[in-house]
Image (cartoon, rainbow, N blue to C red):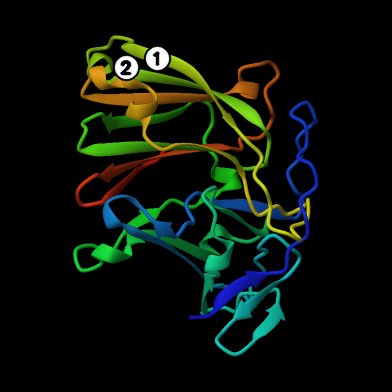
Amino acid sequence: MRHLVAVLALLAAASPLSAQFQPDPQYERILVPVFFSGPGANGADWATNLELTATTRNIKMPVPVLLGDYYICTLDVCSCDLKDLIEEGKIESVCPEFEDASGILLYVPRNLDPDELHIAARVMDRSRVSDRYGTAIPVVRERDAPDNPMILLDLPTDPRYRVALRLYDIFGYDDLYEVKFFDMNERRRGNEGLLLTTEIRVLVQPQPQGNPARFPMRPSFAFVGDLVAAYPQLASVPSIGIEITAGDLLISPPQPHPRFYALASITNNTTQEVTIVAPR
C-alpha cells in the first residue's frame, strides 16, 4: 500500500477569535476527526486506516489533494516520489506518521465535485480483528459542518461502557463550547431534563514541523475521555443527550461560516467494540 507523505513548516500563531474569519478561496478543508494508532484499555491495539480514491466522471484527470503543504508525495518501500495529484482510479493511504489524537485536515479544490473524491476512515482494534473489522469514522467537509447547536442523542451511562466526547474547530480557533447534558427519558416525555451545563475549550494544536499557516494539518481540539468520570452527576440517569453550542456563535453577529464539529464514541469496556455517534 502506498502512503501519502507531506513535507511540512511550523504553523504560524492561530488567528484570534476577534479576527474576521475567511475561508480559503481555492481549497476546502476536510476534517477526519479520528486518525490515531496505539495501545488502549484492556489490551486493545488501535489503528486507523485513511484511504482516498478519485473517480472523475467527465475529464479523466488526477485530483489534487493537499496534506498540510502545497504538495504531497507517495511513499513505498523503496522511494518517495513528489507529486500533487491522486490519479483517477488509484487508491492511496495517508501515512501513519501523521496520525494525531486531534485527527487530520485534508484540502481539496473548491470546484471539485464531492462525488469525485472518495475518502474512507476506519478505526479498528488489531488485537480483535478475528471478531470485527472496525468502525467507520465520518469524514466532514467544510461545506457540511453542522449549524448551531449540535445534538448528540442516546449516550449510555452504564459502567459497561465509556463514552468519550471530541470537539473540533475546523478552522483552528481557540474557543469555548457551551455543553448541556440532558436526561434522555425526560426529553422523551417532553421535559427539559437538564442535568448539567458546562464549558469546554477547544485548543489550537501543535502542528508538525514545517506545516505552513495556510494549510494547517491539525484542527483545534478538545477531548473528554470518559464523560461519566468527568461529570459524575450524569450517572444518575440511564442515558444522556448532549447539546453543544460554540461560544462565538452565542454572540451577535455570529461567525458567518459553520466550522465546528463534535463526535461521541461509545466503547464497550470488555470487547472494546466502538460505536460512533455523530450529529445529524
Q: Which residue is drawn at 31% across and 50% down?
A: 41
Q: Residue at x 32, y 21 (%)?
A: 232
Task: Residue 154 in the image: state x and y as whole percent.
Answer: 28, 30
Q: Can residue 280 be seen in this view?
A: no
Task: Residue 268 in the image: state x and y as whole percent.
Answer: 24, 45
> Disc 1 designates what residue?
196
Labels 1, 2: front one:
2
**Left or right position of 248 against 155:** right
In the displayed orientation, state which residue is furthest to the bottom: 78
Q: Quadrant of residue 183?
A: top left
> Disc 2 designates what residue?
233
Q: Quadrant of residue 27?
A: bottom right
**Circles 1 and 2 in contact, beta carbons < 8 Å:** yes
Cα–Cα gap, marks 1 and 2: 8 Å
Count of marks, rendered view: 2
Element at label 1: strand
**Left or right position of 212 against 261:** right
Task: Residue 245 in the image: state x and y as whole percent.
Answer: 53, 24
**Dot 1 alpha-carbon crowd within 10 angstroms: few under 14, some 14 to 19, many 20 or more:** some
**The C terminus appears in which quarter of the rendering?**
top left
Element at label 2: helix
The kind of residue on which mark 2 rests is Gln
